[in-house]
Image: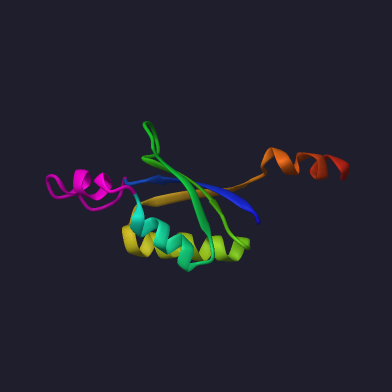
């Protein structure tokens, strides 16, 4: 299955109520996990990050279309801005190199 990394920035989102961000992250990302799984994906890892992005997710989907649908749904549900890229795990490098 294709692998993707999505970087999420909360800039441009509505300001959070005091304490709501801590409450939202204290249990991890169960709603994000459900959303990814509802689109046929697997959410492998979610990281809080520092810098231009607030969250980094490592996911697998059956297709690029399924990933795009999940990212659109995520935007609708949570807001923010995502930047998603397809990535190729080391296990695929040999097959990629054969076609060069």
* Above or below, comparing residue 48 to residue 35 in the picture: above
**What residue is rendered at 61% in x and 60% in y?**
64
Residue 53 location, x and y as percent?
40, 39
**What residue is rendered at 28% in x and 52% in y?**
13
The quadrant of the picture occupied by the N terminus is bottom right
The magenta region covers 11-28
Query: Is residue 24 part of the magenta span, yes or no?
Result: yes
**What residue is rendered at 33% in x and 57% in y?**
79
Q: Main secondary structure of the magenta part?
A: loop
Dividing the picture into quadrants, the one containing residue 73 is bottom left
Residue 97 location, x and y as percent?
83, 39
The quadrant of the picture occupied by the C terminus is top right
Left/right placement of residue 67 relative to residue 96 reads left
Query: Is residue 22 part of the magenta span, yes or no?
Result: yes
| Residue lying farthest to the left in this orientation | 18
Residue 76 location, x and y as percent?
36, 64
- Residue 40 appears in the picture as rendered: yes
- Residue 100 appears in the picture as rendered: no
């Amino acid at each position: 299955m294709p692998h993707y990394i999505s970087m999420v920035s909360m800039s441009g989102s509505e300001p959070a109520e005091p304490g709501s961000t801590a409450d939202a992250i204290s249990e991890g990302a169960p709603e994000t996990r459900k959303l990814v799984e509802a689109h046929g994906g697997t959410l492998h890892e979610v990281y809080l990050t520092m810098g231009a992005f607030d969250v980094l997710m490592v996911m697998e989907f059956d297709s690029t279309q399924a990933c795009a649908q999940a990212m659109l749904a995520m935007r609708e549900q949570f807001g923010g801005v995502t930047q998603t890229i397809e990535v190729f795990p080391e296990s695929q490098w040999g097959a990629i190199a054969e076609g060069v």
